Image (cartoon, rainbow, N blue to C red):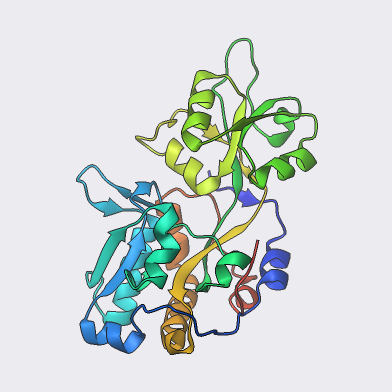
């Protein structure tokens, strides 16, 4: 089932997305001309976050963001195979760009104000957000089909995350159970110790996909926030041609429906920027 954002996408994208000034910092990733002369693109990706980026049964990198990396190589270099994919840990994703280990990062990175101070972002290619995965129904517990069914429920949430405040506002009577990791949350949901877990929609989609840890569980149809994911590039005016080329590619993918089709293929919640919002959204970067 495709899911809809509860948050006002237009205001999130149209009001908060501001183009940063290009500031010359110590970033040394290759410029567009150098990438074309080299003949291949180097991209930091995830290999443990299905369906965004993961190793499939053949031990090959696969997923929505892997498709984007290959499509970008095709647009910039004319060859989808002209790309070197570099699996990267979360803590290293920004440093990989700044320290010249990769040209760009396509690795589930949300646009935020602190990050914008040290790197540049492309137009968003996907809107992630907070979603809910629920326990299986039992004879003694009713089905959980909507947020209304969680009003008095027990919801696991990552400690110190922005989701804590979101839940307090939307579901003030629900009991929150703080967890330190997604794995801990997964265990609680699987055991039935909590009614639901609130976390990134793209992560939960991986849990419920075929072969996922909670493939027999379900996600609720609503997403309560909008967090734009974008390609990360180094700061500096010399990288402006690369950023412009990436933005034009993403804009074209939206117009042609390619991003929407790949999102649906990977059974991601509906998070591609709606067409009516796209022009204002793609005029600028955003924060959360």
Q: Is residue 49 above or below residue 188?
A: below
Residue found at x 31% / y 89%: 33
Whether residue 217 can be seen here: no
Q: Residue at x 68, y 34 (%)?
A: 146
Classify residue 146 as left or right of residue 205: right
* Residue 255 falls left or right of residue 167: left
Picture quarter with the C terminus: bottom right
260 or 242, nearer to the observer: 242
Residue 170: quarter of image: top right
Residue closest to the eye, 47 or 14:
47
Q: Position of residue 225 (x, y in %)?
A: 66, 52
Residue 222 placement, left or right of 93? right
From the viewer's perspective, is residue 84 above or below residue 142?
A: below
Kindly identify the residue that appears in the image at 54 percent across and 46 percent down: 201
- Residue 227: horizontal and vertical position, in percent? 60, 58
Q: Position of residue 104 (x, y in %)?
A: 38, 71
Q: Quarter-wise, where is residue 219 in the image? A: top right
């Amino acid at each position: 089932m495709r899911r809809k954002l509860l948050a006002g996408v237009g205001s999130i994208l149209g009001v908060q997305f501001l183009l940063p000034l290009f500031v010359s910092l110590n970033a040394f990733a290759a410029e567009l001309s150098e990438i074309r002369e080299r003949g291949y693109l180097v991209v930091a990706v995830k290999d443990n976050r299905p369906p965004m980026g993961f190793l499939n049964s053949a031990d090959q990198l696969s997923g929505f963001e892997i498709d984007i990396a290959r499509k970008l190589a095709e647009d910039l270099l004319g060859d989808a195979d002209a790309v070197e994919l570099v699996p990267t840990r979360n803590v290293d994703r920004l440093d990989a760009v700044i320290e010249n280990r990769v040209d760009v990062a396509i690795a589930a990175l949300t646009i935020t104000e602190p990050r914008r101070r040290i790197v540049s972002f492309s137009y968003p290619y996907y809107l992630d957000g907070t979603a809910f995965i629920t326990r299986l129904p039992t004879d003694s517990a009713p089905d959980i089909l909507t947020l209304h069914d969680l009003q008095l429920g027990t919801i696991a949430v990552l400690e110190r995350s922005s989701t804590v405040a979101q839940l307090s506002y939307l579901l003030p009577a629900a009991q929150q159970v703080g967890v330190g990791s997604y794995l801990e949350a997964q265990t609680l949901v699987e055991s039935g110790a909590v009614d639901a877990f609130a976390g990134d929609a793209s992560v939960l989609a991986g849990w419920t996909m075929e072969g996922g840890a909670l493939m027999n569980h379900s996600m609720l149809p609503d997403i309560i926030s909008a967090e734009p994911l974008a390609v990360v590039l180094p700061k500096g005016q010399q990288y402006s041609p690369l950023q412009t080329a990436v933005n034009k590619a993403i804009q074209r993918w939206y117009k042609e429906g390619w991003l929407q089709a790949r999102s649906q293929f990977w059974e991601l919640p509906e998070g591609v920027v709606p067409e009516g919002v796209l022009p204002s959204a793609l005029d600028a970067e955003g924060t959360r």
